[in-house]
Amino acid sequence: MTLVAVCVVVFMLLLDMTIVAAALADIQASLHAHLSGLQWVVDAYALPMAGFLLTAATVGDRLGRRRLYLAGLVVFVFASGACALARNIEVLNALRAVQGSAGAVLLGVSLPMIAAAFPDGRQRAGAIAAYGAAMGAGGAVGPLLGGALVTAYGWPSIFLINLPVGVIALYVVIFAVPESVVAQSRPVDVWGTVVLTAALFAGVYVLIEGNHYGWSSPIMLGLSAFSVVALAAFGVRESHQVEPMLDVRLLAGAGFAGVSLAAFAAAGTLIASTNYLALYFMNTLGFSPFDAGLRALPLTLAIVTGAPMAMLAARRIPVARTIPAGVALIAVGMWMMTAVNASTTWTHFIPGSVVAGLGLGGLSALTSDAALSFVPVADAGMATGTVSTARQIGILAGVAGLGALFSHHAGNLAATRLSAAPGIGVEAARQLSDGLAAGAGLRALVVVPERVRPLLFNPNAID
């Protein structure tokens, strides 16, 4: 029952990471949000997860994992309901941060709960495989389920779906999950948590707002320097702690560092890019959220298929080969999805989605299990928390970095080409450039006078 409760909640947590992709266009239109606001819808959820995961695992070891799990689950459910009631992008993003903080608690103590419930190594491996499959499935079905909900009930429904799932998980935890604690747990590192979170926030803020303020502006340079110095200070402090929140010696080992880097790379590339691909399907290709979710089905099926395939392969092939193979599949699949132009159809993304999805599904199943192989059971929370933190940092950096690149490139390219288009007008051209830079796609045409719109589709009038 511990495994059931953990898998249900982890499914919900990863679902909330990807389900918003299907709702971004609807949120953008409903709350009049710019691309930076949409980036924070994702990153406000991932940021506290990255900052609080390791601390949550330590607090759970000390106070009791079941007790902390219940508290995190209650907060997550209430925050989900509040997100559905948000009426502007700032409030929504603030509530997403509350969601992410509660999610950090849940994710931080989930694998230690499994490790305590399954002391036998063989049984624990099977339980962790199920955990990885639930994680992969949650991330995979998000776009499709989100598309169906948004099309039928609007964007608030993607948050309301957490209420019945959370209530079921609460029932199971209250009545069927035993408490587990560590007799000699490491002390809670409040200083380390604050510094790590501040460093990540500063770095993400620079990536998201750099186009707005200017990359060489004093505030951006100052925040960049602060982020680097704070991360360095965190690393130095942890390396000198007797009982660190993050044992830097683990990252010095090639095996554990490789697992963490693989989790970071997968999250920062494929998972982050799905948000922008969903915007492209809806705003440029004109699909409804549900139709966009259907077209993400090749990726979904590949992720779900990749997890058990990877676990079967891991029985005969060492993780030193299977994990790099998963990363390579993601890289190849994403390369196959490039070369998009004005005549590209959604079918262009199918082969790459399948290849990359198999790699992501495999990594979802393998990385958590591999992380535990480097530490004793007593350090399970720190090991799995470190890999999960690397994954969340990857999402943070990926969403912010890809958004910055897209916004800069699309905005500049649109401004340059629209300046050569006759009859559009300076103000309409500026608004259209801003809309395209915000990922609004063809919806940006709403600012262009009706009589001028044919010029934008005339190759003789504009390149």
Image: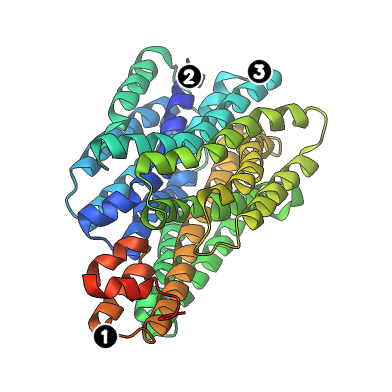
SS for dot 3: helix
Q: Amino acid at mark 2?
A: Val
Q: Give the numbered dot on residue 4.
A: 2
User: Crowding near pointer 2: few (<14 within 10 Å), some, many (20+)?
Assistant: some
Identify the residue at horizontal 77%, vertical 31% (top origin).
313
Q: Nearer the viewer, mark 2 or mark 3?
A: 2
Name the residue that disc number 1 marks: 426
Percent position of residue 58, x then y: 48, 40
Q: Amino acid at mark 3?
A: Gln
Mark 2 / mark 3, whichever is N-terminal: 2
SS for dot 2: helix
Is residue 378 rendered to the left or right of residue 446? right
Identify the residue at horizontal 39%, vertical 70% (top origin).
457
In-front residue for pair 101/272: 272
Q: Amino acid at mark 1?
A: Val
Percent position of residue 133, x then y: 57, 29
CA–CA distance in space, label 2 to label 3: 14 Å
In-front residue for pair 206/308: 308
Identify the residue at horizontal 36%, vertical 56% (top origin).
283
Percent position of residue 207, x then y: 44, 69
SS for dot 1: helix
Name the residue that disc number 3 marks: 123
User: Crowding near pointer 1: few (<14 within 10 Å), some, many (20+)?
Assistant: few
**For residue 122, which quarter of the picture?**
top right
Looking at the image, is 47 positioned above or below residue 179? below
Q: Nearer the viewer, mark 3 or mark 1?
A: 1
CA–CA distance in space, label 3 to label 1: 67 Å
